[in-house]
Image (cartoon, rainbow, N blue to C red):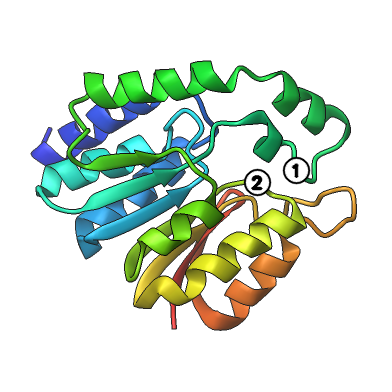
């Protein structure tokens, strides 16, 4: 087994300990983007338990440079915006503080605090902190209002040729729109690289 294979196995072992919905295939692609492009500034919107941002941080640690900023308020009120029925009840009853503490403990345990900076804030609150972004993973609230706001706030900050990853491209809220507005904009203004499940990887034009 070569060094890269060993690293991938370590990333996968860590990912399996984390709460979230990032698949093995998606985590591998995120890691490969970091290893190949060596982005200096990465932003993730919607961290939850860290299942995608921690693999990204591990890749940064492997190359010895760069930072990923994990933006998430870990707060009920923000999670339930645009949600109804079962989605609303699930997010409303979730212990957000436990999820946050688990994520912070995972960062410390895996010695990733130099490579991953948690920002406990909404994406709107955090946006002024960034000028130029090399790679962004948008996986926050999937309502039309919130998903479009994330794209509106951050798209111009991503450099030309930068990587944009958007999760849940087919998600629809009760108005039958959901992420469609955001996805249509990205489809028009970026090169589509590939889909992994319901996650789409883009290169900004």
Category of crowding for the residue at label 1, using alpha-carbon neighbours closer than 10 angstroms: few (below 14), some (14–19), many (at least 20) = some
How many circles with numbers are drawn on the protein?
2
Direction from residue 113 to residue 199 in the image, left or right: right
Counting from the top left corner in percent of width and height, residue 160 is at 36, 81
Residue labelled with disc 2: 141
What whole-number distance in Å separates the C-alpha atoms at marks 2 and 1?
7 Å
Counting from the top left corner in percent of width and height, residue 81 is at 75, 43
Q: Which residue corresponds to the image point at 61% horizontal and 81% vertical from the top-left?
A: 188
Lower position in the chain sequence, tag 2 or tag 1 = 1
Q: Which residue corresponds to the image point at 80% horizontal and 24% vertical from the top-left?
A: 89
Direction from residue 67 to residue 191 in the image, left or right: right
Q: Which residue corresponds to the image point at 42% horizontal and 19% vertical from the top-left?
A: 101
Q: Secondary structure at mark 1?
A: loop
Q: Secondary structure at mark 2?
A: loop
Contact flag, marks 2 and 1 (Cβ < 8 Å):
yes
The one of 3 and 108 positioned closer to us in this rendering: 108
Q: Which residue corresponds to the image point at 36% horizontal and 38% vertical from the top-left?
A: 118
Residue 142 seen by the camera: yes
Counting from the top left corner in percent of width and height, residue 165 is at 48, 59
User: Which of the two discs, 2 and 1, sits closer to the camera?
Assistant: 1
Category of crowding for the residue at label 2, using alpha-carbon neighbours closer than 10 angstroms: few (below 14), some (14–19), many (at least 20) = many
Quadrant of the image for the N terminus? top left
Q: Up-down: is 124 above or below 117?
A: below
Residue 102's image quarter?
A: top left
Q: Up-down: is 105 above or below 143?
A: above
Counting from the top left corner in percent of width and height, residue 45 is at 49, 49
Direction from residue 116 to residue 154 in the image, left or right: right
Residue 169's image quarter?
A: bottom right
Q: Which mark is residue 81?
A: 1
Residue 132's image quarter?
A: bottom left
Quadrant of the image for the C terminus? bottom left
């Amino acid at each position: 087994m070569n060094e890269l294979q060993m690293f991938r196995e370590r990333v996968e072992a860590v990912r399996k300990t984390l709460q979230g919905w990032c698949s093995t295939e998606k985590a591998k692609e995120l890691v490969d983007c970091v290893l190949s492009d060596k982005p200096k500034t990465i932003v993730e919107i919607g961290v939850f338990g860290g299942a995608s941002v921690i693999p990204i941080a591990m890749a940064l640690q492997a190359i010895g440079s760069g930072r990923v900023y994990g933006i998430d308020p870990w707060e009920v009120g923000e999670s339930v915006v645009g949600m109804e029925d079962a989605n609303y009840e699930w997010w409303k009853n979730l212990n957000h503080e436990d999820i946050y503490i688990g994520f912070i403990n995972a960062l410390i345990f895996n010695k990733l605090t130099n490579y991953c900076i948690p920002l406990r804030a909404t994406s709107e609150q955090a946006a002024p902190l960034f000028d130029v972004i090399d790679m962004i993973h948008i996986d926050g609230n999937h309502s039309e209002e919130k998903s479009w706001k994330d794209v509106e706030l951050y798209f111009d900050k991503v450099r030309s040729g930068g990587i944009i990853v958007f999760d849940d491209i087919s998600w629809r809220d009760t108005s039958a729109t959901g992420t469609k507005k955001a996805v249509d904009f990205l489809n028009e203004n970026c090169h589509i690289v590939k889909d992994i499940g319901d996650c789409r990887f883009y290169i900004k034009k």
